Amino acid sequence: MKQTLTVKLNKKKSYMIEISDSSFAKLNRDIAEITQGQKRLFVVSKRVYKLYSDKLDIREDELFIMPDGEQEKNYKNYLRIMDRALEVGLTRKDVIIAVGGGVVGDIAGFAASTYMRGIDFIQIPTTILAAVDSSVGGKTAIDFAEAKNIIGTFYQPKIVYVNINFFKTLDRRQFMSGMGEVIKYAMIEESCKYENSLYLFEFLTLGYEKILEGEPLTTIRMIEYCLNLKAAVVSKDEKESGLRKVLNFGHTLAHALETITKYKKFTHGEAVVYGMYFILNWAYKQGIITYSYYKLSTELLDKYGFKPLQIKYPPQKLVEIMKKDKKAGTGKITFIVPKDKKLVREIQLTPDEVMDMF
Ligand code: GLY
């Protein structure tokens, strides 16, 4: 089965996303066809290369193996990719292809956007997290001076191939990390302004057994729903001047938790889940959402085996980190808060107000 959707953007930047369970042989053929006549540099996650090198048609002389982990998304690896691109002899007409999770997609995208002022870029996400989020939308980045994504560009890929066969080798924790972002989409669906109702919230509630089993058709549908929502948002606000911020539901606390633990304790999805429990709880206590929606939304998270954060980090330190977030700008801290079922809105709070949330 294959589902195709389009991220509609102006200036010839629109691109397709293909979500399928087709064989790796078919994926190899698709890549060969779309890159015909081009030199290619594959930036491949080390973990993925170990598992899939015999299934993917990638020659040694067009390969850069990217070490895994957020700490590797740095300028040293960026420069190594540049070196390799020169060695391979990539020109302006050529292409960089990312095969891996978010770290690989972000750094390879940044390399593609800056090498010779920008060459073609293809995303092949191999985790659920990267498939539903970072591989689509054109955010590219590296981390620098302990600041995540502080150097980066908006640079859209030419095409995104989501092949769900890669998900079979995700461990439970990586799988659930992706599900954290998936549930986020259910809670923001109506704010994404997609043309139809997808009923993702209900789909996740009713379909959770098949989803957790990784049943292919259900998985493809789930990714498709999330990416329809992401594509709708990105089409309307490519550079995050407004609407795109809704995608950051749960992320204000998540980023602070990831930073305070130096990206070593929580997966991104786990941190987002803690952020969602936190803001849902706060919104309920403030009388912003009803008890019935508070219960419904936290029950969805509970159903997938998630729990609110049990460890207490010093609020003062978390708020300090939130103040430094590159997106803050105004001295205030941005939160995306629930408004009603599937609806969220942006609010700006002073650091003192955020302290009172804890
Ligand atoms: N990860 C949020 C975004 O792409 O805007």
Image (tube, rainbow, N blue to C red):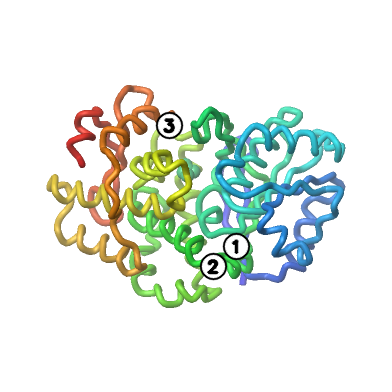
Q: Which three-letter amino acid code belongs to the residue tagged 2?
A: Ile
Residue at the location (48% across, 62% down)?
173
Percent x, y of residue 181? 43, 55
Residue at the location (42% across, 39% down)?
259
Write down the residue under mark 2: 220
Percent x, y of residue 346? 30, 38
Would you say 281 lies left or right of 227 here?
left
The residues bearing labels 1 and 3 have C-alpha atoms spaced at a distance of 28 Å
Residue at the location (74% across, 43% down)?
96
Write down the residue under mark 1: 19
Q: Secondary structure at mark 3?
A: loop
The circle drawn on residue 332 is none
Q: Which three-letter amino acid code belongs to the residue tagged 3?
A: Ser
Label 3 residue near ligand 1, CB within 8 Å: no
| Quarter of the rendering occupied by the N terminus | bottom right
Given contact means CB atoms under 8 Å apart, are the residues at marks 1 and 2 in contact? yes
The residues bearing labels 1 and 2 have C-alpha atoms spaced at a distance of 6 Å
